[in-house]
Amino acid sequence: MNDFQATQDRSWLFVFIAWLVASVSTLGALFLGEIMGYTPCVLCWYQRIGMFPLVLILAAGLFPFDRGVVRYALPLALAGWLLAVFHWAVASGLVPERATPCSQGVPCSVEQIGWFGFLTLPLLSVLAFSAIIALLLMTHFKASK
Amino acid sequence: MKKTLFISAAVILLLAFVGGAIFFGAEKAEQAGQRVDKNQSVLVREHSPTLGHADARVEIVEFIDPACGTCRHFYPLVKEMLAAHPDRIRLVLRYAPFHQNADYVVALVEAAGKQGKYWETLETLLAAQDDWVMNHAVQPEQVWRHVEGLGLDLAQLRSDMDAPEIARLIAQDLEDANTLKVTQTPEFFVNGKPLPSFGYEPLKKLVDETLASEYR
């Protein structure tokens, strides 16, 4: 019983941390877009579609704790991760810009932020989605052991 | 325990967001003010269309895009302010034609000005904006039927529109907008001061304050 409780607590913590990552990413994206006035490019919008709902879905899975939340959150996180990797490839020049859907409006290859010389927004997005996926997978596998 | 953790995390995140927004907003307004102070000479050019009394001590400079919907909504509100204080407020228009083909309409309005019908033409076109702006792009062929009733010499208007001085004037205004970091329209400066935040209320407040300090 105690073992079960400890596993449950650890799983809860994983989902909670994933929720934290999603919340920080969401608020960060909103801050850059709405407050600082950086217009999001098309790929950024698609990634937002993957990230924003996670804040609500993961929170709903925390109270009362439901491990099944992994099944609902993971598809969004995976889709967001793929888009983020693609965006990152575009921004670092691995994929040519004209092969992407954002030739009009704000180009996705323009790097609006570069912290510490390497931390661009697409990279931050890749990292955030990766962290969320890792935490969700840990919740799923650790808890079912 | 878990609930406390969750709620405190949510509150901290939200507070950080709101605090950051307030801090950043204040910072931005201050920088905009400094930029205007440094570049007072680019705020108004000799060619800029002006409405109101030359001796008015309150000057509203508006960066306008004739194809911008918010500009259309603000225009009558600004006119109301002028009407409420004739002789005290002057309006100066600068162009920031950011929409696709918007410079076409600017050229048309400027050319109408050569026939002495600048403001009628601008106001008529703004009122009919829905009809000639589609998906944020000006449809040049849709513009003309709205200016037909204004008694303009249309052939003259068409040839005046292509005058190089109009192109120069637009280029100059865009350059000044860039210097002042005007990236959205409409953007207002009241006696050289930018709005602390965008909106009708902040504009009204800034104009009223400037009126109060200029006409004590």
Image (spheres, rainbow, N blue to C red):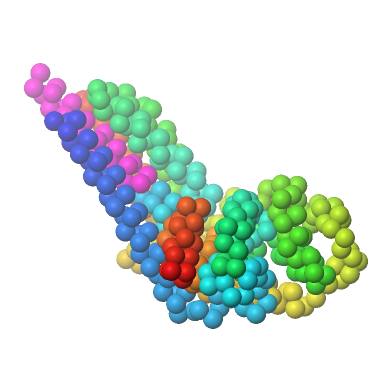
Q: Residue at x 56, y 67 (%)?
A: B88
Instruction: Give the x, y percent position of residue B110.
Output: 75, 69
| Chain part drawn in magenta | A1-27
Q: Nearer the viewer, residue B165 or A101?
A: B165
Helix, strand or loop: magenta stretch: helix
In this rendering, position of residue B159 left or right of residue A109? right
Instruction: Give the x, y percent position of residue A123.
Output: 39, 54
Q: Residue at x 86, y 54 (%)?
A: B149
Instruction: Give the x, y percent position of residue A126.
Output: 38, 49
Where, quadrant-wise, is the C terminus of chain A in this rendering?
top left
Instruction: Give the x, y percent position of residue B19.
Output: 29, 52
Question: Magenta stretch containing residue A6, yes or no?
Answer: yes
Question: Magenta stretch containing residue A99, yes or no?
Answer: no
Image quarter for residue A66? top left
Q: Residue at x 32, y 59 (%)?
A: B23
In this rendering, position of residue B166 left or right of residue A86? right
**Is B6 above or below relative to A25?**
above
Residue extending farthest to the left is A2
